[in-house]
Image (cartoon, coloured by chain):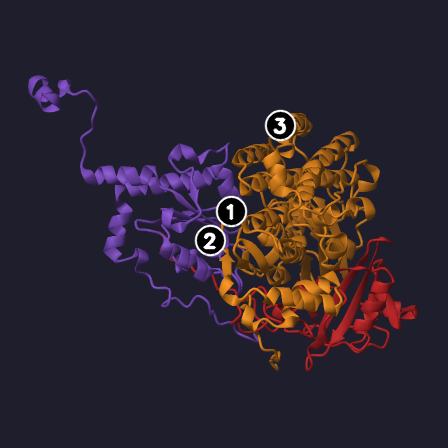
Chain colours: A red, B orange, C purple
Amino acid sequence: MSDSAGTLENAVETQHGCPVQDSLGQRVLHASRDQYVSVIKALADDGYEMCIDLTGVDYLEMPHRKIGFGIQPERFELVVNLLSLSQRQRIRVRVQVPADDVTMPTLFDIHPGTEAHERETFDMFGIVFAGHPDMTRILMPEDWDGHPLRKDYSQGSIPVQFKGANS
Amino acid sequence: MTIISAGTAEGGQELLSRSELTAKELLREVGSVLRLSETEAALLAEVQTEAPEDQTMIINMGPQHPSTHGVLRLMLELQGETVLRCKPIIGYLHTGMEKTGESLTYMQGGTNVTRMDYLSPLNNELVFSMAVEKLLGIDGDIPERAVWMRMLLSELNRMSSHLLFLATNGMDLGAVSMMLYGWREREDVLRFFQKVTGLRMNHNFIRPGGVAADLPAGWRDDVLAILEGLPSRLEEYDILMTGQPIWRERLQGVGVITAQEAIALGATGPILRSTGVAWDLRRDMPYLHYDQVEFDVIVGQYGDAYDRYSIRFNEIRESMRIVYQVLDCMPSGDFRIQNKKVTPPPRARIDESMEALIHHFKIFTEGFKVPEGEVYVAIESPRGEIGCYIVSDGSSNPYRMHVRAPSFVNIQTMPHMMRGGLVADAVAVISSVDPVLGEVDR
Amino acid sequence: MGVVQNIADDGLGGMDHNFVTARIEDLVKWARSRSSWGASFGLACCAIEMMGTGASHYDLSRFGMEVFRASPRQADIMIVAGRVSQKMAPVLRQVYDQMMEPKWVISMGVCASSGGMFNNYAIVQGVDQIVPVDVYAPGCPPTPETLIHAIETLHQLIEDGEIMRRRVANNGGAGVELSSEPVAHTSVTIGSK
């Protein structure tokens, strides 16, 4: 089950200096933090003109997961889905973001459509996008504490009380 | 556990007043998207600052406003009747669905996602189910009948969603009779859904592995009744709205967006198609059996609200074309995959077999385990590309479930469409973007 | 001469028009219940069913409720249709405060009534924490029939005067202060899952 990442280490294909993984038939690039913006830029020049989605994942509960390619897994991961309208292809870029430095460069200059996505990722995971023009919360109230989609943030369920029922 | 604090100055989410406005904020609103050169952006900024603060006014539209389709809040800066700036503020319907989705099993997940885009719930369930099936590796083994049923329901859902768009678009622009007609037609489709799924909305009918139940007896006649009744009514709407000079005046040339802007902003669906980009996932990256049916992708030319209206209008007709073909192709057979891992035993077996009862109980309490991995699956919902990104850690709950909601991205186009227009046109623009706030905020 | 003379001559048969005698209190209750206008407070899925109820097939105007007022100041019944998030809660309360007395609240759907399936950080677990609710309509979403039933129930309660008696008795209604309700800041425990 868990060796799907391990078997892929044989694949040595790279694109723009990033190892390429085949995740269930989908093309995934593992970029480092330094490569991140330049890879997205290079991909945009390759024809991936649309940034479809940008989101984060908090891997707090999977610290020893295998990524392969000698990449050190970190707590957070940034997932960017790109789409090429002309080639009818998708590509996904995954970037590891360490917990002690959650600042990432923004993609706003390349894909202005990531503005809302980056704000949402900041709101939900606390990943800060340096250079973003309006780094504020988007979904939660602005005085909210914490970032709800982090794994150490409780779901906030309140036990259901049954009161006032005729017994 | 170390608590990480993000070091940002979280400012207010509101629109800044003009005196606090920095060039950067302005650049965010126009410059970057239009890819203007810096001198042009600066020129624009100069023109903007010519309006002194005492002549402009920041007003709040929403979150409780009849024409904002729910709880969308727009902050508009007006000079007289002209919209100078606009900032959509969302989050008033934030439901924490992605967090809740992490604690629900894959079996229960459909209940959650179906409540996101409540105008096309079946499309939400479809994309979630397809993502789970891909993770399970059974996406090629779904029975034919289930696939065609999914297409049938998905297209009928597209019709009901677009009919509701016609209704609300008419209501927002003052054609209130259109609202009554749109709802009337939608009721026909909903009645069919109720017969098939048991519910009018939020069906949770399309599930990983197939669909929840087979089509009821007489379904074909019901579908044919809908398909035969609709064309004459659509012609009525053509007379009522499409050719009507007032309607055209209200919509033509309003909320114009170019293909370049739409692509830069990530807009999909009718907004992207209205700019002349023929992009429809059903045709360009086919899923289900859309490569086996014939239909046209409706494309606009001017990128204005009228184009978006006509695209949705004609997509109803295209959906009807697809449904006719689905009726011809519908095979007999299983409606869900016969894979013990994901499929509960049939009801009759539970009464006679203890194992079946245990199996049934385990599937509905523990759920089924999904191999480790991550996957992104996208389909064409009535509003654009809806995608589902699931990370599985090998357990029966998704480790992370993210939905790429088309309305969430499409809302970003509003400031560009409204800029320089009138307040009355702002209503037309909101209506033509057709956002569903449940999906925007999730 | 005139009406008085006619009545003096022929008793009530001398009247030109029909008329009804009643206590003013009953007339007021009757009028209130038969022309209660809704404030359109559509939030989520339930709002679609609420609009569907007002549309041609279910035709809410049969009950004197065809006008959903956009302005809370012109409305009598607030139908809270959908889930109320923590961010929306203050807005909802403000809209309620802007409505004129007498006013009533229908909590439509399980999300508004109890949080429903969304028992999490983002959703107010029951709109009755913010505004006093008179009738709860169950369902997810309630069908238009359910909503009509809820409205009919409310009309009956208004006509009986039971609601107003209850309000007076417990000093309820608009007497609830928003500031006393810890709505916007629900503390969430960090580190426990």
Q: Are marks 3 and 2 on the same chain?
A: no
Q: In this rendering, does residue C21 appear at all?
A: yes
Determine the residue positioned at 87% across, 54% down: A87
| Element assignment for label 3 | helix
The residue pinned by badge 1 equals C46
Q: Earlier in the sequence, mark 1 or mark 2?
A: 1
What residue type is disc 1 on? Cys
The answer to whether B30 appears left or right of C5 in the picture is right
Q: Pointer 3 and pointer 2: residues touching (CB < 8 Å)? A: no
Front disc: 1 or 3: 3
| Element assignment for label 2 | helix
Q: Pointer 1 and pointer 2: residues touching (CB < 8 Å)? A: yes
Which numbered tag is attached to residue C112?
2
Q: CA distance from mark 3 to mark 2?
A: 38 Å
Q: In this rendering, does residue A54 appear at all?
A: no
Determine the residue positioned at 30% across, 51% down: C101
What residue type is disc 3 on? Glu
Depicted B288 relative to depicted B47: above or below: above
Q: CA distance from mark 1 to mark 2?
A: 9 Å
Q: CA distance from mark 1 to mark 3?
A: 29 Å
The answer to whether A25 appears left or right of B200 in the picture is right
